[in-house]
Amino acid sequence: LPNPNVESSLEAALSTRTRVVGAQIVGVSRELDLAVIKVDAGKLPALSLADYRKLGQGEMVFAFGSPEGLRNSVTMGVVSAVARQTDPDSPMVYIQTDAAINPGNSGGPLVNVDGQVIGVSTFILSQSGGNEGLGFAIPSSVVSVAYRQLRNFGHLHRAQIGIGLQTITPVLAAALHLPRDYGVVISDVLPDSPAAASGLQIGDVLAVLDGRPAENLPFVAFHFFSLEYGQKVHLDVLRGKDRLSFDVPVAQPPRDTDQVAALADPEKSLVATLGILAVEIDHRIAAMVPDLRDPFGIFVAARATGASEEVPLLTGDVIRTLNGQPMTTLERLRRALKSLPPGAPVALQIQRDQKLLFVAFTLD
């Protein structure tokens, strides 16, 4: 649903489409491409969510959907990877499967052999545009968190404890005299954050996260991604020769990307070259995004349907410059992109969360 303000109410067709009932949008997360819809009907049958932690590579799964309008279609495959991180700059991981996921399957359940929903099909990677055995689904643990928050608040609250994380390399470990040369190290502790108040420090090496070994960054980042405000996270860290334990409360970040994204107009906000819906930052947007470095730029409200994976932008990013030139309006961004020939290199300086970074790609 690109814009909840466009369709706050709709109709839902049940079963064989012989019964049509009213429905209402309860909440939307553009970042996850998920929505909660309330259907005005009596007691309806529903599938339960599987425990994602028990999912194993090679397990058989079934993808349900309506590809090309062919309702109630099902394809079969296996779990190719339990936790595939498709973007190194995003904490989100997906279930990778070779079950055919075609246009129309997005939003359909990925079901295990016990008839439980282990994920929600969301996108494919393909050179041809069709199924090539590289399908991805949002894990059930994330779906569960998203459902509760969208139902209760209407949008998604991304929880955090206020730390930056980095993969340990042998060179980094040797230079910083870390207690081990693999795993994850805390590279930043935000002032006045729960992590700072709890006593975590830059250079601490994560050993255990909520009872599970913190062996790699995708696992740690995804675990934090699925936490909810009000919980506590238990950390065991290595600091020199000491092993320390911390119980850190999870805080809600000040930024609410869905609130800003709701202001995007699907027609006026489209930047087709980048495959995004975007809004110009003004005083109103700046008030909603209090961690902005500067009160200008282009806020990425959503990725457009079918957006190229070659453009590594995420919902909530703020575009500051394009090839060194400040981008303050959508018109200026469109003109700058239009002036570049196909194959031209593009470097965008963006703000992601509280950090500045460059993302680079070539124009199609």
Image (cartoon, rainbow, N blue to C red):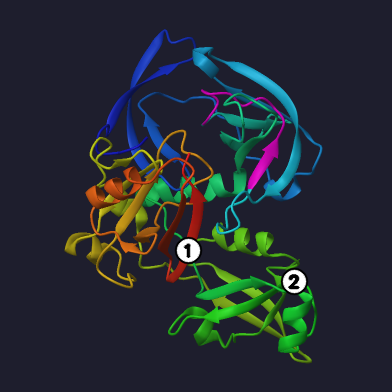
| SS for callout 1 | strand
Question: Is residue 81 left or right of 285 when viewed as pictured?
Answer: right
Query: At x 23% / y 48%, what residue is drawn?
Result: 331
Give the prevailing secondary structure in the magenta stretch: loop
Mark 2 → mark 1, Cα distance in angstroms: 25 Å
* Residue 358 - label: 1
Question: Looking at the image, which is closer to me, 15 or 362?
Answer: 362
Question: Looking at the image, which is closer to me, 105 or 296?
Answer: 296
Residue to which mark 2 is pinned: 183
Q: Nearer the viewer, mark 2 or mark 1?
A: 1
Q: Position of residue 28 (x, y in %)?
A: 38, 43
Residues drawn in magenta: 94-106
Q: Amino acid at mark 1?
A: Phe
Q: Amino acid at mark 2?
A: Gly
Q: Position of residue 136 (x, y in %)?
A: 62, 38
| SS for callout 2 | loop
Question: Looking at the image, which is closer to me, 60 or 276?
Answer: 276
Question: Residue 178, can we see it?
Answer: no
Is residue 129 placed above or below 25 in the rendered structure? above
Q: Which residue occupies the extreme bottom position in the image?
A: 241
Residue 280 part of the magenta segment:
no
Quadrant housing residue 188: bottom right
Query: At x 76% / y 79%, what residue is drawn?
Result: 171
Q: Position of residue 304 (x, y in %)?
A: 40, 38
Point out the tag, 2 or 1, that comes first from the N-terminus: 2
* Residue 58 - label: none
Quadrant housing residue 166: bottom right
Q: Position of residue 68 (x, y in %)?
A: 51, 15
Question: Residue 249, can we see it?
Answer: yes
From the image, which quarter does the N terminus lie in? Answer: top left
